[in-house]
Structure formats: structure tokens, C-alpha cells
Amino acid sequence: MRRLASSFAIWAMAISILAVPTLASAFSLTVMDPDLLKYEVLPDTTVGLVFNASLNGATVTTDNVYLEPRDGGPAIPASVQLGTTNQSNDTIYIVPDDDLPWGVPLRVVIDSDVEDGGGGKFDGTFPGAGVDWFTVNVPFDLARPDPDGGFTDLFVNSNVLIGFNPLDPEGTNPNKPWQIPGLNATGAWKFHTGRPEILVADIDNGLKNYHDPEVADRLFLNIGELPEPRIGDDPCGDYDCNGDGRISASDYAQDNRVSDGGLGYVDPERLIDAFADGKDDDNNGYVDDISGWDFLRDKNLPYGVDQFPEGTHSRLVAKAATAQADNGEGDKPGVCPDCSLLVVRVTDSVIGDIDLIAQGAQYAVDMGAKVMMVPLGSFDNSTFSQGVFTDAYENGTFTIAASGDEWGFHHLYPGAADDVTATHGVLPMPPVELIGPIGIDAIGFTESYCSNWGAHAEVTVPTGACTSESTGNGGGMAGLLFSYGLELGLDPPLSSEEVRQLMIMTVDDVANHCFTFTGGGCRKGWDIHWGYGRVNAERALMRLGVPELGIPETIPPAVRIVTPKWWSTFSPAEDPTLTVSGQISARGRPFKYRLEIALSADPDDNDFVKVDSGSSNGAPVDGVIGSFDLTQYWSMEDLRLPAMDAWDKSVTVRVRAWWDGPDGRVYGEHRKSIAVNLDDDPDTGWMPGLPRNLGHAGQGSAVLYDMDGDTDGKLEMVLGATTGVVEVYKLNDDDEWEMMTGFPVTLPEPPRPTGLGVAPPDGVAGSPAVADLFGDGVPIIVVNTFQGQIVAIWPDGENHSGGPFVDGFPVYSDMPDNDTSFQFGHGNYFAASPTIADLNGDGLKDIIAASYDQKVYAFQPVDEGPDGYADPVPGWPVLVDAAPGKVPPEKVCVNGIPDHILVSPSVAILDPDSDDPDIADYPSVIVGNAEMCDGCVYLHG
């Protein structure tokens, strides 16, 4: 039995007055079920039309009452039936032969031949939304999730995307958003479901495989590396061979060169098997990059390791953004189910190197991505990565990144970077009663139990768990906005800043109905937990305009603070004036703006004070927005006091702009958190010239060592940079730090797993080691690198005759087996500092380093062989694993899964009194790996 919906839209036919009998009166439509106002329309809907008159049954046929796609196409096969609601034969039911297509606006056509019993004609008026079309906006795979997915899948499928009260859809009160659990994709889908030209990239740790039916036909194809499809052995003549409007793997379904591998359908991996030829056909630096790239393995198949914890993270995020809708697979659709997907793998887990993440992001932009999702964090940051994301922003690509899943307020990059929008997570709570009359309304907005928060919080996005899914859902929403803007033909096209403004300025406010696990937040407007509030996809989409409903475009002003940068620290002793520069525009409209500051990282709206303002007749502002004197708001004595908490010296800088819209002011805004501090005590304060921005992260501590051996008695500061250089700073005669001559030294280009892609960036995460390796009094700098290099550098760096590197260096960790992602494991990174010790008693200091490949390496500083590389200490490297025989039999360890070592080895003679000379006379190497074991631990004494 098909469902009768509760409202729908009818096409207004022009009725010729001459065709109406003189004595007959026109009749009207009183109920349309469904119409555009209906919250939940399923594919099995029967269309019901109730009129204010009894109809002449002889005039009601499938030729003059039917459904057709609003934007063109054949009529939907259906039957029509007369029924009685208020009087006989006053109702027409249109009963489709099959399920209605999801996401396609459908027009109800009532021809002028339809008459009532007195010969009257339909008057062409429409109740409800007043338009002649409706959309099936709730696909079966959302309304009827797969019960085998368990509680979590059912919970998420039922709630995270919907824009209505799931307990009473048509009783939904949009003024009570705490009763609506999702981001309202269902409302947005009434108007748009995405376009294949909009490419959404997931910068992540890879898919399980390419043949997941939810994404197989959404995955991007690089036609620069592919021949045109064929039908059998005959040319098709178009890359869109099946004519569905997108270039995808299914276009090769009839190509005799391509096998489906027994799947019953073609996926991109089958195209790689068929057409990878070992050539870079499109000359972009990546060989056979037919559908994405694995930057960790330097290969064209970005698959993660399903056996690793969250090792195929892309599967969740990519599907949240772009999974197909109503394809019979039972999984929930993506927020932009008709957008396209690019998968880029940059790490083996949910943490990675920021420069490798940025290299993957640059690739995505080059391939045409309009949206980049980064649902992971980095252990470092750099000017290079910031430049990539800024360039992407300025060229129209929107980046959304996870704020992190540590339930704290620390800064996780790239989510904490400039020109990147960070997501916070909210659980999709249904409006159920908890205990008797106690409803869940009070905590309808419940913060994700793992979501980070902080001053960079901008938007809150529903998730079934943490911020990774929030990133996917938010990325899908951004794709939907770009796509709808393209559909409307906006000129100029939407910018990345306008997408950000649409997301933050159309939110549901969470005030008075929210709960945070760590306390705080829940204020009206912006707060440090929720940002501006929970996103609302339909509301954002409608701000682009809905011509069919007469709704005009009301895009918020684009507002961007360029300087100061996020998290900058200023001292009024150096310069009391802080200048704010940026960009403001409103699509050629006149606008006004205000520069405001508040002395907090988490200010109330009324804490802001205006420090400058301006207006424009329509020309964009690009440059100085305003400035203010720091000493007007702080005394020097207050700034010298110790900070009482993490935000005691924080300042929020906010720029608000507006233009006068048809229903009032249309606002846009941008804010940043900075700090003001003064620590000029001559004994304990900052040294002259510090702090300074080095342009890279400082994961490894600086090493203080007398590198130049001069008579000043001062120690130099040795730093290893994540950007691939080693720096040495020296105190000059004015006691200010400056780069020592001969430095920085740029690390050599690392070996690559395949050489098929662009060389990866390299850098140093741990602290350098400095030691007299040869016993001649000359200090040698030794660093480990991300890409598995051990580099030894002379103390005079680039000034050293013959080059900066000690003969025989760099040396390398073993290149992993690269046949599969599992065999490649975690790669061959060095994450920690090298350890220097004489392992064999020959008087030379050896270099010991622990790698991501679960091995400990030891190298002598000399090359006595013919290969040109420093010699390994005999017996090394050593695989550090809990294999049988190495651990007590009652221990159960996770064997067979590649693991890694994150720490530096310790070296010591453990027992100089031992009877065993190997123990008494030679040092032992002690290191902990990341293997997990269960069982008893015994203490022996």
C-alpha cells in the first residue's frame, strides 16, 4: 500500500476564460499532499489532490493528470484514481507504478480538460507553498537504515541528516531546533542534491577499497591518464559514455578492456588494472594517478590498512560527504550525494606530518577540488602548510578540518590554521522523554563526548561520534553550497569565504538547550564550545536564492582578517599599535563594517568595544581595516603579572560587516584570538629578539652546545625544523639571537618508495643530538628525519669544505615492502631523537635510532666499505617485537600487525657487576614499542 503524504505542489496551467462555460464556476485545490512544505517525503509516496468540488470522473485521466520532472523528462508512469474526502469524487490520487525518484523536483500537471460536475475548470491556485512541484527528500536508505548496522548506525542514519522532529515530522516546529537532531540536509535536498563538477577531496588515511558501492561511482577519474571508454571494442565518443552527466567508472561498464573483477560493476581499481601504463600522461608529476594518490607509499592506490585502529578512516568521512543516495545499499547518503569524491592518503593513522598533509592538499587543489576535508591532525605546523591552505582559500577552495577528538581546547593543525574552518561535534539527539515528564529538550544540543573546542571553533556539525564525521558532513554541506551556486549560475561564483559565511551565519543557536561534558558554552551567539551554532543546510542553501519561490539571494558579506594571524602574541613595549588588515566585500553592494575587540578568548557579545569602522559604496576593502592602541586597554603593570589561566592575556579581534537586505541587515563576520603579553624582567623575562616566529613547528627541543668553540663562552642553539632544515642560532654582541654562519643546512632529498610521484617533504620531529663522534673534540649534529634519514652535519654547516654532511651520511632506515598498504605498515619514519653511545667499545660514538618500521638501527660514523655509506654496527638493525619466545607465554600480544616505535632508545650498562661480560662491559639498548599485550605482569626480585 502506497503512502498518502500531507502536502504537495501543483503546476499552474493557464486557463482560457473563453474555454469555461458561462454559467460554470472555477474550482480550487484545497489540499496538496505532498507539497514543498512537507518535511518528510519518501519514494513510495502516493500523491493526493483534494478539491472543493466533485469532479467529473470522465475528465480525469492519465493524459491530463500526471507527474513529470520539473526540469524536463518523460512523465512518471502512474495510474489515477478518484476518491472521496469531503464530498464525492473531490479527490484525485496519483499512484506511481514504482517508487518515485529521490531528489528530483516533480511537477503535478492538471490539464485544463479536467472539470467538475458543473463543467467548471481548475482555477490554477495552489495551497501550501504555492508552487507546482515537490521533491522526494528522504531516501529509503535514510528512512530505513540497515538494522544489521547496530544501534550506532541506526541512531546516526535516523538523525544526523534530518531537518525535522523524527517523532512527529509534520508537527515539526522550526522555532524549536533543539527538537530537530540533524543538520537539515533533508530540507536542502528539496532544492538540490549536488553536481558531479563539484569535487570534494578527503585528505586522510585512505579507503578500505574502491569497490564500496556507496562511493565507487562517485570517485573522481583523471581523464588525463585514461583513454575514452568503449562500447565493446567500438569508441564511445565521450568520456560520459552512459550519459548520466558524470565521468565515473560506470562509463567503462561495457568496455571490453575492463573487467569488473566479479563485482557486477566497474570501480576505479579495475581502471587502474586496465590502463596504468607507467607513464605520467598528464605531466602533473604523478604516474598513473587515475583516481587519487597515496603520498605515504608514493603510489596511485590510496588504500588504508583496515587492521590498524581507524586505518581506513576515509571510509567514514568520504561516505559522510558523498555517498550515493537511495542506491539500495542500506547505508546513509552523503550530504552532497551527487558531488564527486577524490581520495588522497597522507598518513597511516589520524595523525600525520603537516607538510605531507599540505602536499596532499596541494594535489587536491591541482586536481580541481572545491572542498577539502581534513579529518585528522598533525604533530607539527609550518609556513609551507599555511601557504598551501591560504593559496587554496584565495583560489576558491574551501577547507574544513577536524578540531580534534581529545576533549580539550588545544590547537590541532590544520584545523587551528588561518583560512581553515574547524568543526565541533554535536550528537543528533532525538526529542524523547528521559524519565516521565522530563524531556530531552534541555539537552537537545549535546556536545560530542570527544570533540575539541576553543577560540577557533566556528561551526558545530552533527556527528554520531567525534569530529571526523562532523568534518565529512560539513564538507558535504560545503559541496552542496558550491554546487547549488553553480546550478543557479551565480556570477561571480561562490568564493570559499562566502561558503564559510553561509555556514556560520545561518546556524541554529544552541543557547538554553545544550550540554557540554566539560562545562561552559551554551550562550546565545558565538561561544568557545559551539562556535556560532549548529549548521542548517537548508537555511544556508536558501540564502543563495530560490527563484521558483521568489526568494532572493542574500549571501552574507565576505569578511576575512588577514593580519594578525591566529594565536599571534604582541608586546606593547615593542609597538603599542596593532593594525588589522583584511578583505571585505558584498558582491558589489554598499556595506558598512566595524572593527571590535574584547579582552577574552571567550567573550560575550556585549564585551566587544568598537575601535574603528568604515563603509563602502560597493568596492571591496582589501588592506587596512583599522588599528588600535594596546595601551588604551591594558596597563604595563597588568601585562607584567603572571597569567591566571590559559586565556588571561587573550584578545578577540572581530570584524563585522553588513548590507541592507530585503528583510533587514545581512551580516558577515570574522574573528581571531591573539595574545598580549609583557615579560621584560631583566633576569627572568624574554631575551632580546625572543620570541620569534621560526616558520616551523618546535616539536623537538633545542640543544644548547658550544658549536663554534670560540672564546665568548656562549652556547649556540641547535634546532631541527619540520620544514627540512637544521638551524643554529648564535648570540651576537648585542645578546640577540641570529643565524650562525653556515646555517641553515637543508636536508638532502630523501629516498622515495617508488619514485612515481613528487618528492615528499622531509623534516625533523625530534631534538637534534650533538656529540663528539670521533673523539677529536669536533661536535657533530645528528638528526633523524620523517622520511627515514639519519643525517650527520659538520659544526660549520654549509661552510665546511666538501659540503655540510659528514662522509657516509645520510644513511637510511630500510624501505618497507610496498606491495600493499598492510605490508608497508607505518612506513619508515624516525619520530624521535637519535641516541649517541659507543656500543662496541671501539672509541667511536655510534648513532642509535628507533623507527616507525619497528626496528632499532645503529650506525658507526665511518664508512669502511665500498658503498659510500656509514657502516651499520654488526648485528643491527634489530626488529623489536613480541614474537613467541620473547615474552612470557602467559602474555598475549597482537602479533602479525605492523607496529611502530615512537620514542628514543635509552643506552646504559645495566649491571657493571654482572658475571656476564656482555652485560658488565657493554651497554644495552632499551626501547619501548607500541605493541599491545594482555596478560599478567610479574615482578621478580
Image (cartoon, rainbow, N blue to C red):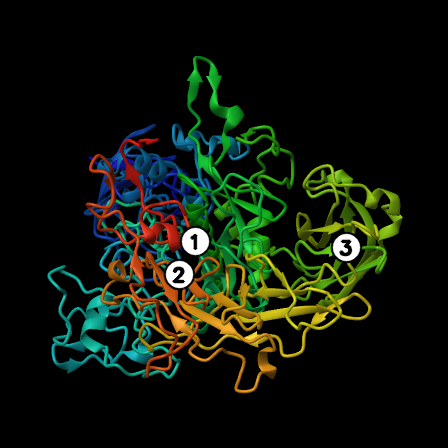
Estimate how packed mark 2 is, as few (under 14), some (14 to 19) or many (20 or more) residues with alpha carbons within 10 Å: many
Q: Nearer the viewer, mark 2 or mark 3?
A: 2
Q: Which residue is mark 3?
A: 686
Residue 161 seen: yes
Question: Is 877 on the left or on the right of 700, as rendered?
Answer: left
Question: Is 56 on the left or on the right of 905, as rendered?
Answer: left
Q: The disc labelled 2 sits on which kind of residue?
A: Leu
Residue 106 drawn above or below residue 287 = above
Q: The disc labelled 3 sits on which kind of residue?
A: Trp
Q: The disc labelled 1 sits on which kind of residue?
A: Val
The foreground one among 880 and 551 is 880
Q: Which residue is mark 2?
A: 839
Tell me where residue 777 appears, x and y as whole percent.
58, 71
Q: How many marks?
A: 3
Say whether marks 1 and 2 touch (CB < 8 Å): yes
Q: Nearer the viewer, mark 3 or mark 1?
A: 1
- C-alpha span from label 2 to label 3: 41 Å
Q: Which residue is mark 1?
A: 907
- C-alpha span from label 1 to label 2: 9 Å
Tell me where residue 932 appears, x and y as whole percent.
31, 42
In the image, what residue occupies the spot 45% across and 53% down?
Answer: 376
Residue 838, which numbered label? none
Lower sequence index among marks 2 and 3: 3
Residue 261 drawn above or below residue 662 = below
Tell me where residue 276 appears, x and y as whole percent.
23, 77
Say whether marks 3 and 1 touch (CB < 8 Å): no
Residue 191 seen: no
